[in-house]
Image (spheres, grey):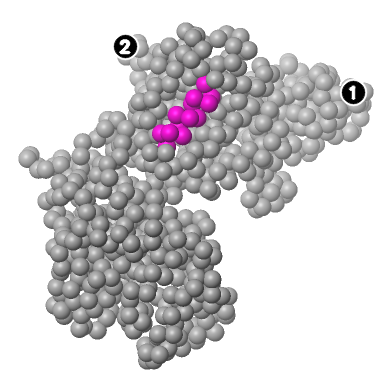
Amino acid sequence: MSAVSGLQDRRLAGTVVTDDGAELVVYAHGSPRAEATVVLSHGWTMSALEWRPHVEALTRPRPGFPALRAVTYDQRGHGRSTRGAAPLDMALLGRDLDLVLRRATTPEDGPVLLVGHSMGGMSVQQLAAARPELFGSWVSGVALFNTCVEDVGAVPFVPRDRGAQRRAHAERLLADGLLRSPGWAKAVHRLLTGPLSHPSTAPLWHALFGRGPQTDTARADAHALRAIPPLTVAEFFAALTTHACAGRLGALGRVPTRILVGALDTYTPPAQALRLADNIPGATLHTVPKQGHDLPYERPVLVVETVHALLHDLRHRRETSPAAPPGARPRLGSATMNSPMTASAENGGLRPDVLRARRIVVKVGSSSLTTAVGGLDSDRVDALVDVLARTRSGSTEIVLVSSGAIAAGLAPLGLSERPQDLAGQQAAACVGQGLLVARYTASFARYGLRVGQVLLTADDIGRRAQYRNAYRALAKVLSMGAVPVVNENDTVATSEIRFGDNDRLAALVSHLVRADLLVLLSDIDGLYDGDPRRPGARRLTDVHGQQDLANVELGGAGSGVGTGGMKTKVEAARIATGAGVPVVLTAARHAADALAGRPTGTLFHRTGDRNSDHLLWLEHASSPRGTVQLTADAVRELVQGRGALPATGVTRVAGQFVAGDPVELLDEEGRVVARGLASLAFQELSLLRGRSGREVVHQDDLVLLPASARAAGLPAQLRRQVSVRVLPAREFAARDAGGPGI
């Protein structure tokens, strides 16, 4: 359906008459008793119909999301609103929005959020510059799509590949012609509203959508443009060039403000969005890949997600501010367990590492998804998905690592407990994995989100080519807007190629996808210094390194339906934090608080920087195919990083490996001090050990293990070198190419 159809479905709220006689037509949607009101301001050449799909989504209640009230209006000279007598400038549009705001909303009815696209975003800025006292008292949040703070002047049908001076000259000529020549204005208007396939309009549609014109949204744009007189289009272009709000937007810093821009937008490009964000204290900027200037049309779900994210941000601010006076009406509805707005976290500041995260890996265990006797618990799955869908708003990406396949298969197979034999576990996983993914698919579909199943074994992560392929697959799923659901492939994994638990898998995936945060969800609300069931056990809120775990008693296996325990979670946290990824460990019921940055559970801080994918794979994901024992001098040379390891330092070789296989390097006492990729096969190394200078492991294919180095009694000054490695030149090239550097 085009954007101009269904006009009769809109609810006319009234007409606002301005001082210069313009009649602004205002529409209201949803209940006046809704928890919040969203006022949406459209862009140049559009109308209130631009917001029709968003209004339908915002005013309809969904699980975990309240129904909101939406107010739209036709900007003067657009849609059904008249132009008025005053000369057009952007300050005038700001005053128009002020009138609409005061006519259609009241602060006593709850939070009022402003959403503006393109020229509508500039109208919001003009309001903030002229009436700063409204922000924080009347207006509670702002979302700005594809807009800028000043220097508007890009004309869509002047190609971007012209030189800067030639383009500027062409824009001036075209603008002057539009303003001074009615005939020229009409000709350009006919061109833009004509056949979408006309070659002269290609730059316009590519700027709007980042692609060609054969889309329903492109046709809707053309329909909207046809409804506006050509000279009005020209006048408003001139008005846009007067927009200048730099240094005048401090009021927007009083309320949550989110800015979104398409990476391919050439009207208000990402550089303009960055300048806008620099003018608004605390603003959040999101760049959406592969999109142009018309984000609200092309990605309607972004508008809905951003509005709910603003409510999320608003509640965070209010929960950390002084309590409201007695008798005051709540500005938002009561929190639920399913919402990241829950107030169950302790008092305290928010965690910056969590708030900054834009790609988050979330791991959930079997016990958080199933009943005690097996079988999926639909309510628990939906509760988790509600939280993840809310967190995913804006540009935050979620990768879900989910256990539960074997547990989900127990009840359908009539089993009362987890099978102990591998074949029984594989049978349960075969039945349960389909049920698990089907349940996630149905639950995410409530939010218009698709899921992509990714099944991995340790062999997939432990082989360099498959590791690269896994990265590419996950990156593609994320770029297409789906939610990857990762699990170990229990159906085909053998005892030799199993992770054994999804905690370690989640840590490796967090590094693989270059995540900013790993959240481990369990049935325990953090790491305790002893059995949490024991009186006096204390929860650790922060772990900064191994020294904080010195007096901690770690439990073994977890629930009866899973394989994870606290030991595996702490080990996963060590892997991730050592690679520069902070980790939050908490109970699934506190997932919302954890993802909102509240101090729930235990935060494991980074202990290292992001290292080479190749070295992390070698240390944590590879399966050694043999061992190579070294002399004391060879171990010392190894730790000091003095080049390649020669065969003269080898005393014993075990296993069956070929060149390129991972092997463990042992000291004289048999303790593992390093892992590396063998340069020689087992048979050849067995013949050369102790008497040849041939290279056994190249230094670029070597990772030293800190814990093992300490156990080997190495001097402190050498142990400090254990985790330090120079990234080989070939890995810089791989990283620049966009793939994992392995």
Screen quadrant of the C terminus: top right
Q: Amino acid at mark 1?
A: Gln
Answer whether residue 184 is visible to the viewer in this image. yes
Counting other residues with Cα less than 10 Å from the Cα at mark 1, is it few (<14), some (14-19), or many (20 or more)? some
CB within 8 Å, label 1 to label 2: no
Q: Dot 2, how many residues are within 10 Å of its Cα: few (below 14), some (14-19), or many (20+)?
A: few
Q: What number is the disc on residue 683?
A: 1
Q: Main secondary structure of the magenta part?
A: helix
Residue furthest left as drawn: 327
Q: Residue at x 46, y 34 (%)?
A: 441
Residue 100 in the image, given as x and y percentages of width and height: 18, 65
In the image, what residue occupies the spot 51% across and 79% down? Answer: 158
Query: Residue 137 location in percent, x, y?
Result: 16, 55
Q: Which residue type does callout 2 highlight?
A: Pro
Q: Where's residue 688, x and y in %?
A: 91, 26
* Image height of 419 relative to 739, above or below: above
Q: Nearer the viewer, residue 723 or 279?
A: 279
Question: Can residue 273 be seen here?
Answer: no
Residue 626 on the magenta segment: no
Task: Determine the residue positioned at 81% across, 18% down.
Answer: 654
User: Disc 1 or disc 2, which is closer to the eye?
Assistant: 1
Q: How many marks?
A: 2
Indicate which disc, 1 or 2, sits on the residue closer to the N terminus: 2
Mark 2 sits on what residue?
Answer: 535
The kind of secondary structure element at disc 2 is loop
Which residues lie in the magenta part?
A: 432-444
